[in-house]
Amino acid sequence: MKVVVVDYGSGNLTSAAKAVERAALERGVAADVIVSGDAKIVGSADRLVVPGQGAFADCRAGLLAVPGLFDAVQDVAITKARPFFGICVGMQLMCEAGLEFGTHPGFGWIQGKCEKFDLPPQFKIPHMGWNELTVTQDGHPVMRDVATGEHVYFVHSYHLTDVPAAQILATSDYGRPVVAIVGRDNLVGTQFHVEKSQATGLKLLGNFLEWTP
């Protein structure tokens, strides 16, 4: 199995790749984990992982700046319908639009938009640190053995809104409900950093590697 962690100049690439490798080892999955921004390599992937850090628009621009890269991602994830995992801004890019420093189109794979937190003053922005999950769809294969109350690690100032309930797999709470995991068809994404979320993060990645949508 070729798992490509997409390198477009944004994201915790080394940590994400090592987490995927560890999850594969723990599950006994034979996986060749490659970090690459080469469109041909990305286009040949059996599974894609797209991390992301920073601003929505910057991540989108970085992906589009590499010749053929977005087309390769779109081909694997949508045309070929191979498993796709977006992490943090990599998840946010899956939605219809990001409202950070203007309005910028997303991939349009998940309904909704990415907006800045509007919170009471006692809640610091960015939302940073460990927080509990509330599982809303425990029947999804990627959610196997992931329970409400497990803790995962967040770092973000923007969050997804207007996402249909059918596409939300888990939420968290930070002054308001926060979309934590989204999914539809062969696509999943986490607002939190799976690569920093220890046992729960490895569990999700392991489920992703074993998933046959």
Image (cartoon, grey):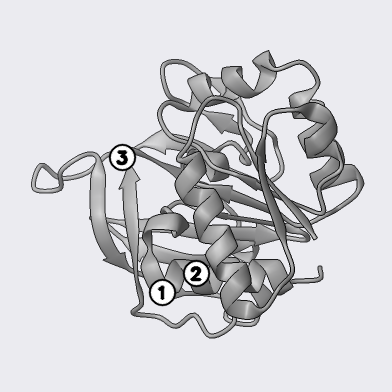
Instruction: Please report whichever mark, 3 or 1, sits nearer to the chain's N-terminal start.
Output: 3
Gap between marks 2 and 1, in whole Å? 5 Å
Residue at the outermost right position: 80
Where is residue 166? Give x, y as percent: 64, 65
Say which mark, if any, is on residue 156: none
* Picture quadrant where residue 112 is located: top right
Amino acid at pointer 2: Leu
For disc 2, the marked residue is 202
For the question of whether residue 80 can be seen, the reply is yes
Residue closest to the eye, 56 or 211: 211
For the question of whether residue 74 can be seen, the reply is no
Numbered disc in front, either 3 or 1: 1
Say which mark, if any, is on residue 199: 1
Q: Are marks 3 and 1 in contact (CB under 8 Å)?
A: no
Asked if 19 appears above or below 97 in the picture, the reply is below
Asked if 55 appears above or below 135 in the picture, the reply is above
Label 2's element?
A: helix
Where is residue 56? Give x, y as percent: 49, 27
Gap between marks 3 and 2, in whole Å? 28 Å
Amino acid at pointer 3: Phe
Label 1's element?
A: helix
Seen at 27% across and 39% down, the residue is: 118
Amino acid at pointer 1: Ala
For disc 3, the marked residue is 117
